[in-house]
């Protein structure tokens, strides 16, 4: 199917083509004479003529009622261009029969020895049959004599598409068609230009073309099918591509085929009827057993050499070798191409290496009974994490209960089956994603995505990718949320609460956080510098009036001037850092959007890149995007597949 833009382009091309057509009218006692006259008026051969009969002629009776044939004629449009345009309108359905309509065609070929050959093809579908008159006219145009008209008639009627000798001509070799060959573009392309034969000159045979190309060192990639068509319908005095070299293909590099998900963006978080995420169905931790194959090396491929049209070989590179990404608790098989697990545990990718990590399980709560936990692997807690405790893990952290005012730090994902209520204390940080039923009064930092099925309340949340709240109570109320790509929830803001809700997207949150600190530092330094300059100016004015200052005041003035210089240098350094971060943020490709599937309340502040907008009107099912430097309200956009724990996704 074609789109509207293509249709406009096609129709414009056809309109320009129709405007460029030159029409002529011709009359004659017979149709053949009228056609011949029209061809003469347009200065083209009869075979390139298209015509419409405007008025049919009649021979009359004894000179009475005689009527001449009247036609309107024009040059036939290039069949190749028409085919390219019509191809765009072809239906996508391949199971319907295609009936091609094609006119019968006439071709004349003059070969050495004075032989005139005629080829006629049969019409297809509703195409018009080739005309005997047309064939005779074509032969006459080429100065063919001794024409066997009966054989011409038979050839036209049968239309077998083969050359048959139907006459002779007086051969003048100095008027033969001539071909010139050019090799270009690093010997990867060959072109030819053919001069039309003059009266008595021969056409060029297929074998002669091949010999000429070979003599000019064109020996590879010759377009023989095109050449056969060219012989029947030559294009004279134009540069035509006749051969294309073969480009070399480098072999594929060796790569590692993993038997586990390394970027698990195919799985999905499943939400129950009560709006809760069912973590039991996630298979968050990929468990493996001892000696289980984890990854296999696929060897590199050999390169396939290329060749220029002059048969010069173009070498290709073989694929590069690679090494197995062997980490901890794994080993290589005897065949040296497979990684096997050395222990039973969880398979994870760490710094590009395959590792099998054991899972440390806490039965019950993290409390005084367990103390703080630090583990070089994955930590599983069957209960809650109480106030004041911390968990640090090199892998994932999974908590079946809830998290209070605690600190969680994981290089992988953090999954909390209930929720987080940090009571404005503690911190939860994950190198990848954070998933919880709800987040309240918390400080959250995620290297990828934050997902909360029941919503986020009065929290500071930073995600390097997206923040998604989807569920029956999926609301974002109060706090400040920052994400690179997207913030998406059912409800944004609160109609009754005076708590400020700020949603920022379209930038790197970490860099933006650093930028905010620097801008606050700049503001403080600028204010202090202004106060220092004012104090200096006051003392200078006193000194000018009194011609001198007391010794203590003079010392204080020198101290202030030294402080001013220090503040100026510090301000310059801060402004340099701000400029550097701003330049980096401007290079980011993140589009940034804020969406609410149900409602957005007035008072919500939207920030996309460096543009701020406060919502003054209640909206339903909308998405805020940045267009032409302005934040615009558009139709609600469903969130893209979002990476959750270990790359799992949710709708």
Image (cartoon, helix red, strand yellow):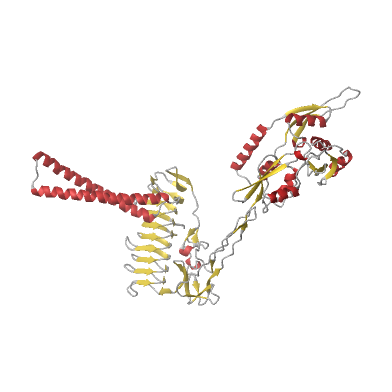
In the rendered image, the vertical position of residue 462 relative to residue 337, given as above or below: above
Front residue of 290 and 43: 43
In the rendered image, the vertical position of residue 102 relative to residue 520, given as above or below: above
Task: Residue at 71%, 30% (x, y): give it.
Answer: 23
In the rendered image, the vertical position of residue 271 relative to residue 571, given as above or below: below
Front residue of 198 and 48: 198
Front residue of 479 and 582: 582
Q: How many marks?
A: 0
Please identify the residue farthest to the top as the structure is shown. 64
Instruction: Residue 76: give x, y in percent of width and height.
Output: 72, 36
Task: Residue at 11%, 42% (x, y): give it.
Answer: 543
Please identify the residue farthest to the right as the structure is shown. 62
Instruction: Residue 271: give x, y in percent of width and height.
Output: 49, 61
Quarter where residue 388 is shown: bottom left
The answer, for residue 74, to whether it is visible in the render is yes
The answer, for residue 403, to whether it is visible in the render is no
Front residue of 363 and 181: 181
Task: Residue at 49%, 54% (x, y): give it.
Answer: 639
In the rendered image, the vertical position of residue 561 relative to residue 318, given as above or below: above
Indicate left or right for 426 with 433 as reference: left
Instruction: Residue 195: give x, y in percent of width and height.
Output: 71, 40
Instruction: Residue 501: give x, y in percent of width and height.
Output: 37, 51
């Amino acid at each position: 199917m074609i789109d509207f833009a293509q249709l406009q382009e096609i129709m414009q091309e056809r309109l320009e083509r129709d405007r460029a057509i030159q029409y002529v009218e011709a009359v004659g006692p017979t149709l053949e004479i009228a056609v011949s006259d029209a061809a003469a008026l347009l200065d083209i051969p009869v075979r390139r003529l298209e015509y419409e009969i405007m008025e049919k002629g009649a021979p009359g009776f004894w000179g009475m009622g005689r009527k001449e044939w009247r036609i309107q004629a024009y040059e036939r449009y290039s069949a190749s261009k028409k085919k390219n345009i019509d191809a765009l309108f072809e239906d996508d359905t391949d199971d319907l029969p295609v009936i091609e309509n094609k006119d019968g065609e006439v071709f004349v070929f003059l070969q050495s020895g004075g032989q005139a050959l005629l080829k006629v093809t049969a019409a297809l579908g509703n195409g018009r049959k080739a005309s005997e008159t047309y064939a005779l006219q074509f032969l006459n145009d080429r100065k063919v004599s001794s024409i066997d008209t009966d054989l011409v008639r038979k050839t036209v009627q049968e239309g077998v598409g083969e050359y048959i000798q139907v006459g002779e001509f007086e051969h003048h070799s100095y008027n033969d068609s001539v071909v010139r060959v050019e090799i270009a573009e690093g010997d990867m392309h060959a072109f030819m230009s053919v001069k039309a034969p003059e009266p008595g000159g021969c056409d060029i045979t297929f074998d002669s073309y091949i010999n000429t190309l070979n003599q000019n060192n064109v020996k590879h990639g010759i377009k023989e099918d095109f050449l056969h068509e060219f012989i029947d319908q030559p294009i004279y005095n134009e540069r035509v591509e006749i051969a294309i070299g073969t480009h070399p293909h480098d072999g594929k590099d060796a790569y590692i085929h993993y038997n586990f998900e390394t970027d698990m963006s195919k799985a999905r978080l499943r939400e129950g009827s009560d709006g809760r995420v069912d973590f039991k169905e996630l298979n968050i931790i990929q468990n493996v057993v001892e000696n289980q194959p984890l990854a296999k090396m696929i060897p590199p491929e050999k390169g396939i050499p290329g060749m220029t049209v002059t048969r010069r070989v173009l070498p290709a590179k073989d694929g590069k070798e690679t090494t197995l990404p062997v980490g901890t608790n794994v080993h290589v098989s005897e065949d040296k191409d497979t990684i096997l697990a050395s222990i039973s545990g969880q398979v994870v990718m760490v710094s590009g290496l395959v590792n099998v990590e054991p899972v440390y399980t806490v039965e019950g709560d993290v409390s005084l009974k367990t103390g703080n936990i630090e583990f070089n692997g994955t930590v599983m807690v069957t209960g809650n994490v109480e106030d004041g405790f911390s968990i640090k893990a090199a892998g994932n952290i999974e908590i079946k209960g809830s998290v209070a005012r605690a600190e969680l730090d994981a290089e992988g994902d953090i999954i909390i089956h209930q929720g987080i209520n940090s009571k404005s204390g503690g911190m939860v940080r994950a190198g990848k994603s954070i998933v919880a039923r709800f987040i309240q009064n918390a400080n959250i930092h995620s290297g990828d995505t934050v997902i909360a099925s029941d919503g986020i309340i009065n929290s500071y949340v930073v995600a390097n990718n997206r923040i998604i709240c989807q569920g029956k109570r999926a609301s974002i109320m109060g706090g400040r949320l920052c994400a690179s790509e997207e913030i998406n929830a059912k409800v944004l803001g609160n109609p009754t609460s005076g708590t400020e809700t700020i949603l920022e997207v379209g930038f790197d949150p970490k860099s933006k956080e650093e930028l905010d600190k620097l801008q606050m530092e700049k503001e403080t330094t600028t204010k202090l510098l202004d106060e220092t300059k004012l104090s200096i100016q006051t003392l200078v004015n006193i000194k000018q009036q009194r011609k001198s200052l007391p010794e203590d005041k003079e010392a204080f003035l020198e101290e202030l001037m030294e402080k001013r210089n220090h503040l100026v240098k510090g301000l310059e350094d801060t402004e340099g850092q701000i400029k550097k971060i701003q330049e980096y943020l401007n290079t980011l490709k993140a589009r940034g959007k804020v969406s609410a599937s149900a409602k957005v309340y007035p008072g919500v502040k939207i920030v996309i890149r460096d543009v701020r907008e406060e919502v003054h009107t209640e909206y339903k099912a909308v998405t805020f995007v940045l267009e032409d430097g302005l934040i615009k309200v558009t139709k609600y956009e469903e969130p893209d597949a979002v990476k959750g724990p270990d790359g799992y996704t949710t709708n």
